[in-house]
Image (cartoon, rainbow, N blue to C red):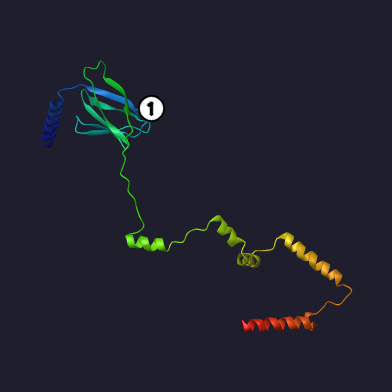
Amino acid sequence: MKYLVLIFLLFASAAVFAQSHGDKPLIQFSGVVHNADSAVVIVPYVSITNTSFHNQVNLSNYKGYFSFVVHEQDTLRFTCVGYAPVTVVIPSNLSGKSYTLQVGIKSQIINLPAFHVFPWATTDEFKKDFLTIKLADDDLEIARKNISKASLTAMYNTLPRDAQEIQSANAQAMHTNILNSHSLTPNPLLNPLAWGSLIKQISDADSK
């Protein structure tokens, strides 16, 4: 009994299919989808919807090639993201059982309205940030800061000595040793003038 019901449903669906298409002959529809502005540019993965046959959807491959079975006078809709849709109708009374077509679709440019994003939620926040803004220094101010005494002192204390500076210091030390090689090296602790200068510096610092 189940087999009889199944056979009956198959015959019923075949009858509905034949009535809906009016016994139209089958056609092997093949082709390539390319950019309408340039026949060389291939458009891959285009959706092809047969609106005349239950919206059956086929897809072209990565080279834009497609091939599937349709009926004569079927309406096919080619759609792809970024391109305007194109409708193709299969002609009737074809001499053979195949139909080949090059489908050209045009790029679709949609101009969206401009949207400006501001980092301030209110006008008061903008005024507050604008009044407290710190302008960047120009080239002259940057040069003044780089050659200032404080900047040079900081670089002198932190930057390593280069080879030329080390060689100059060693040469000066050797020259001093040669000059004092046959005489006693003066000791600043025994120099009364040095002690007077030190006491004067300490007193000036206390007064300040």
Decide if residue 47 is in sight here: no
What secondary structure is found at the residue carrying circle 1?
A: strand
Q: Quadrant of the N terminus?
A: top left
Task: Give the quadrant of residue 206.
Answer: bottom right
Query: Where does the image place residue 127, in percent across and percent down from the top left?
Result: 37, 61
Q: Is residue 21 visible?
A: yes
**Horizontal and vertical percent position of residue 81:** 31, 37
Q: Is residue 203 left or right of residue 93?
A: right
In the rendered image, which quarter is residue 113 located in?
top left
Q: With 129 as the anchor, is 71 left or right in this view? A: left
**Residue 165 percent across, percent down from the top left:** 73, 62
22 to 127, vertically: above or below: above
Q: Which residue is mark 1?
A: 38
Name of the residue lying farthest toward the right: 182
For the residue pair 33 and 154, the one nearer the viewer reads as: 154
Q: Is residue 165 above or below residue 198?
A: above
Left or right of 160 in this view: 55: left
At 22% from the left edge and 23% from the top edge, which residue is drawn? 26
- Specify the quadrant of the image occupied by residue 101: top left
Residue depicted at 22% across the width and 27% down the height: 75
Q: Nearer the viewer, residue 87 or 184?
A: 184
Q: Quadrant of the C terminus?
A: bottom right
Q: Which is more toward the observer, 16 or 165?
A: 165
In the drawing, does residue 127 fall left or right of residue 18?
A: right
